[in-house]
Image (spheres, rainbow, N blue to C red):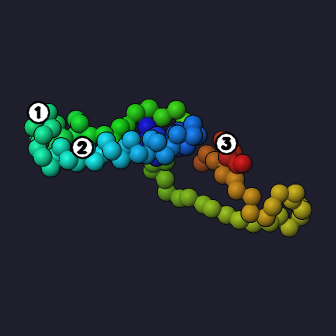
Amino acid sequence: MMPFTRKYDRLLEGSLKQFEEEERLKFAAYIENIENESIEGGNDEYNVLQHSPVVFGDSPFFTCELTGLSRVLFGVADNPFFKSIKSKYYPEVVVMNMKGVIKARVNP
């Protein structure tokens, strides 16, 4: 789980301010321990990283990684033959494979 996701999760729970304050205190203590060379096991790189307050883990949300892309297209256009009920700049993502088959739509 990325740091943003951890914050977003707390935002949804309504405990973001408390979480951010706790994280700030943990990080301040971590930096102080590095400066005072008081990290358990010494200040070598392994121990410093081992005691880091920055936590990564599995995300509870759907995620995807886009790699190996050769093109990304963002387009906005009105259909001249059809009057849409949706607003002109309706946010929507259409995911297609190389054959033009629609694999997914993401919209509000």
Mark 2 burial class by Cα count in 10 Å: few <14, some 14-19, many 20+: some
Q: Which residue is mark 1?
A: 41
Q: Are marks 1 and 3 in contact (CB under 8 Å)?
A: no
- The three-letter amino acid code for the residue at tag 1 is Gly
The secondary structure type at the circle numbered 2 is helix
Q: Can I make out residue 5 in this image? A: no
Q: Residue at x 22, y 48 (%)?
A: 31
Q: Position of 104 compared to 71: left or right?
A: right
Q: Position of 8 compared to 89: left or right?
A: left
Which disc, if any, is residue 104?
3
- The three-letter amino acid code for the residue at tag 3 is Ala
Q: Going from the N terminus, do you reach mark 2 or mark 1 first? A: 2
Q: Position of 62 compared to 87: left or right?
A: left
Q: Residue at x 16, y 46 (%)?
A: 34
Rendered location of residue 60, percent (x, y): 52, 32
Rendered location of residue 77, percent (x, y): 75, 66
Q: Which residue is mark 2?
A: 30
How far apart marks 2 and 3 lie (CA) works out to 44 Å
Rendered location of residue 29, percent (x, y): 25, 44
Looking at the rendered image, the quarter that the N terminus falls into is top left
The secondary structure type at the circle numbered 3 is strand
